[in-house]
């Protein structure tokens, strides 16, 4: 009989009993013990002589220390992406990589959350890139370290991959890639491809890119034109800035209440001429008198106003803030704050002139530290919810100065009923850990409800300590 038939006979004997089946109890149990696993047990896997994966090469990467590895394990258990990004940044600054056993978890997070890939890639090391080649879903990390870009095939890549490769190539060879992009712009029949060509100039943008951007301003496709205009406005000096300055001189005059539109001039209820329309966004945001003024203001550096008024940045911002077109002018100036000698008064004036979502959107577009200092300055009359929403727009970690100021501002406000006694989550997650740790008594005294946010702060403090060299190490360092 087969094994299956032997097992079925043993089951029948169990049902009627050993004596009626003409056997003993011990013999019956032996048969059950033998034929049961033989009939239903898993088969023994066959021996394979070949190695399933190639052996990883020896690596010279320095792994993070024990304390930092322990913090990373807790961060992964919490699934806190902000803390993970902070850990990766500190590890990269320290020149170390993640422990090998954490690499699968990091690769999995990077696969599920593309926004984490840049941070995760920095701590994978050679072993992580080797491991990324094992699974197709991790291939983004396997190729991340490759710097060479094949320009001949780059335009055939998917849109997102193509943009990343072009930007990387631009950083390696700005002049050579500019020549390639100049040729490709004329060759591409599709607007989306021409827009990708223009957008690639953003990496390493310089005055040498202006000729191609000026050509793209004549493109009939809205996306291509607006992308070129956005980039050319970032150039310190350009023909666009000269044209916009001329329009501002012609179109605005200074009154006792600030700048106002000149009568019988280009902004006196007339439709824009073709040359002016060429220098305005076509997405609809710069239509009408207010939009045209904002477009012109966005095309000149803040130095235009300081020179015209003979004032410093603070004085010029005060003049623009008083005028009837303050919101339009200051929203335009806010796009060129990187060129201001002192950007703070411009940012504060622009934020005060706006309300609601426009105010928060402008803050979100500022550099992190400037945005934080601006929130401190303009939030004196805000309630808790508005301050908390504005702070949620600020990327972290914040500077020590901004953290101290925002902590003071939060502490001076009445908690909303839904948050009574609980510390602001965004403050503890993004504020400078050293400042928050030094003011631990203030935090726990002001907000006595010890919630998970305080656990996050403790973890951030441990993270900072884990990557801080010992005092003796600093003394021995030349």
Image (cartoon, rainbow, N blue to C red):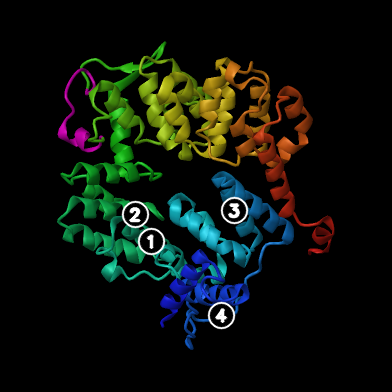
Viewport quadrant of the N terminus = bottom left
The front one of 396 and 8 is 8
The image shows residue 140 at horizontal and vertical percentages of 42, 63
| Secondary element at image label 1 | helix
Image position, residue 432 (x, y; %):
66, 39
Quarter of the image for residue 328 reads: top left
Q: Earlier in the sequence, mark 1 or mark 3?
A: 3
Mark 2: secondary structure: helix
Q: Secondary structure at mark 3?
A: helix
* Callout in the foreground (2, 3): 3
User: Which residue is denoted by mark 2 in the rendering?
Assistant: 201
Hey, which quadrant is residue 435 in on the image?
Answer: top right
Q: Residue at x 42, y 76 (%)?
A: 4
Helix, strand, or loop for circle 4? Answer: loop
In the image, which disc is placed on residue 89? 3
Residue 271 is one of the magenta-drawn residues: yes
Which residue bears the numbered disc 1?
170
Q: Are marks 4 and 3 in contact (CB under 8 Å)?
A: no
Q: Is residue 363 above or below residue 20?
A: above
What is the spatial separation of the Cα atoms under label 2 and label 3, in whole angstroms? 27 Å
Q: Nearer the viewer, residue 368 or 14?
A: 14
Question: Which of disc 1 and disc 4 is earlier in sequence?
Answer: 4
Which contiguous range is marked in magenta? 266-280
């Amino acid at each position: 009989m087969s094994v299956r038939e032997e097992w079925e006979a043993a089951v029948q004997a169990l049902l009627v009993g050993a004596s009626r089946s003409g056997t003993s109890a011990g013999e019956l149990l032996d048969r059950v013990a033998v034929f049961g696993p033989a009939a239903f047990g898993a088969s023994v896997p066959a021996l394979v002589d070949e190695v399933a994966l190639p052996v990883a090469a020896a690596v010279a990467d320095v792994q993070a220390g024990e304390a930092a590895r322990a913090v990373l394990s807790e961060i992964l258990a919490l699934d806190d992406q902000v803390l993970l990004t902070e850990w990766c940044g500190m590890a990269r600054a320290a020149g170390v990589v993640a422990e090998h056993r954490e690499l699968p978890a990091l690769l999995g997070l990077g696969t599920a959350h593309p926004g984490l890939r840049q941070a995760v890639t920095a701590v994978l090391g050679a072993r992580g890139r080797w491991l990324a080649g094992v699974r197709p879903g991790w291939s983004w990390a396997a190729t991340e370290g490759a710097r060479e870009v094949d320009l001949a095939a780059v335009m055939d890549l998917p849109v997102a991959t193509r943009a990343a490769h072009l930007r990387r190539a631009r950083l390696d060879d700005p002049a050579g890639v500019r020549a390639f992009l100049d040729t490709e712009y004329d060759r591409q029949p599709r607007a989306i491809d021409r827009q990708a060509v223009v957008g690639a100039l953003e990496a390493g943008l310089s005055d040498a890119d202006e000729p191609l951007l000026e050509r793209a301003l004549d493109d009939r496709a809205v996306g291509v034109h607006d992308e070129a205009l956005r980039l050319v406005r970032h150039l310190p000096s350009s023909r666009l800035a000269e044209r916009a300055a001329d329009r501002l001189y012609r179109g605005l005059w200074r009154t006792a209440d600030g700048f106002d539109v000149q009568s019988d001039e280009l902004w006196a209820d007339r439709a824009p001429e073709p040359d002016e329309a060429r220098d305005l966004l076509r997405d609809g945001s710069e239509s009408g008198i207010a939009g045209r003024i904002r477009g012109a203001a966005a095309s000149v550096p803040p130095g235009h106003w300081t020179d015209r008024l003979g004032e410093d940045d603070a004085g010029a911002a005060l003049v623009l803030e008083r005028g009837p077109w303050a919101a339009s002018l200051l929203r335009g100036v806010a796009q060129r704050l990187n060129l201001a000698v002192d950007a703070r008064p411009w940012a504060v004036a622009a934020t005060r002139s706006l309300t609601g979502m426009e105010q928060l959107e402008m803050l979100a577009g500022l550099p992190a530290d400037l945005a934080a200092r601006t929130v401190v300055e303009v939030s004196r009359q805000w309630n808790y919810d508005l301050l908390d929403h504005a702070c949620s727009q600020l990327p972290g970690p914040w500077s020590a100065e901004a953290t101290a100021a925002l902590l003071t501002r939060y502490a001076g406000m009445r908690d909303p009923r839904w948050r009574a006694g609980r510390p602001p989550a965004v403050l503890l997650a993004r504020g400078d850990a050293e400042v928050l740790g030094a003011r631990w008594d203030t935090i726990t005294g002001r907000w006595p409800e010890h919630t998970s946010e305080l656990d996050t702060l403790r973890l951030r403090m441990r993270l900072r300590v884990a990557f801080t060299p010992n005092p003796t190490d600093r003394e021995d360092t030349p």
